[in-house]
Amino acid sequence: MKKIDLDSSSAYSLLNPGSVVIVSVGDGQRDNLFSVTWNMPMRKDPGMVAIVSGKRHYSYPFIAKTGELALNVPTAQMVDAVLGCGTVSGHDGVDKFERFSLTRQSAVAIKAPLVEEAFANLECRVSQVVDLGASSLLIAQIVAARVDENHYVDGKLVFDNGLELLHHMGGNRFCVSDRVLVGKSAG
Ligand SMILES: Cc1cc2nc3c(=O)[nH]c(=O)nc-3n(C[C@H](O)[C@H](O)[C@H](O)COP(=O)(O)O)c2cc1C
């Protein structure tokens, strides 16, 4: 196998991340959405997640003020909304819910609205902020979560009902996962 060398600023893209998410923020009066590829689960119990957010994003002061955000997990059908929420800024006075035909849904535990079209929503409260210069790593505890019952059976995601998850490959490129492979144990 012939391999090409990459510098460290390109190498991160080789680690295909989990699903891209649309993060929603809000203070009860105004709200906003932005797309986030750099997200990951960090702890199971209590459930904790982390995202990286640019400090210049319109959304950032909402998170700093409320300490709250929601991760809305889109299906592949929402690819244009995901790209749109990640390329248009609230700094330009855009209502991204309206612009990308998304519906606000009230959250259970936080002020930010959820994206109804997303197949799963995780409401989170930020517990730790790690300064990364132009961005921050936001570590947050999941305080409420809901998922489309058609795609979650016996505590597991299922793809039988046409679920297609969206993974961001950089720029405007995405790939889709739509099936489960069950590995055989060596033991
Ligand atoms: C698919 C996609 C994924 C993105 N992932 C991230 C990310 O992980 N972290 C981040 O800070 N910005 C990310 N961005 C950029 C922000 O979503 C983008 O700058 C957005 O317009 C910020 O919105 P706001 O200024 O309205 O808050 C991503 C953009 C796209 C298109």
Image (cartoon, rainbow, N blue to C red):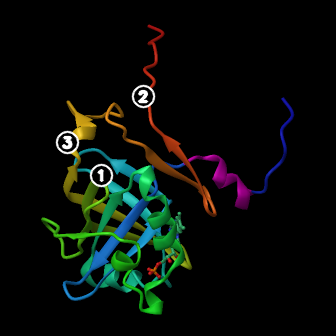
Q: Which residues are magenta?
A: 8-16
Disc ID at residue 149: 3
Location of residue 162 by image quarter? top left
Q: Is residue 88 visible?
A: yes
First in sequence: mark 2 vs mark 3: 3
- Element under disc 2: loop
Q: For this view, does 175 lie left or right of residue 180? A: right
Is residue 84 or residue 52 the one in the foreground? 84
What residue did someone put label 1 on? 119
User: What label does residue 80 carry, if any?
Assistant: none
Pointers 1 and 3 in contact (CB under 8 A)? no
Pointer 1 or 3: first along the chain? 1
Can you give x and y, in whole percent of width and height, for residue 150 in the image? 23, 39
Tell me whether the residue at label 2 lies in contact with that at label 3, contact meaning CB atoms closer than 8 angstroms.
no
The question of residue 65 being in magenta is answered with no
Query: Which amino acid, mark 3?
Result: Glu
SS type, badge 3: helix
Dot 3 crowding, Cα within 10 Å, few <14, some 14–19, many 20+ = few
Question: What kind of residue is marked 1?
Answer: Phe
Name the residue beneath numbered marker 2: 180
In the image, is residue 10 part of the stretch drawn in magenta? Answer: yes
Q: Could you tell me which residue is drawn at 64 percent across and 54 percent down?
A: 12
Q: Residues within 10 Å of mark 1 (few under 14, many from 20)?
A: some
Q: Residue 125, percent across and down? A: 25, 67
Answer above or below: position of 110 versus 177. Answer: below
Q: Residue at x 37, y 68 (%)?
A: 23
Q: Report the front residue among 59 and 148.
A: 148
178 lies above or below 109: above
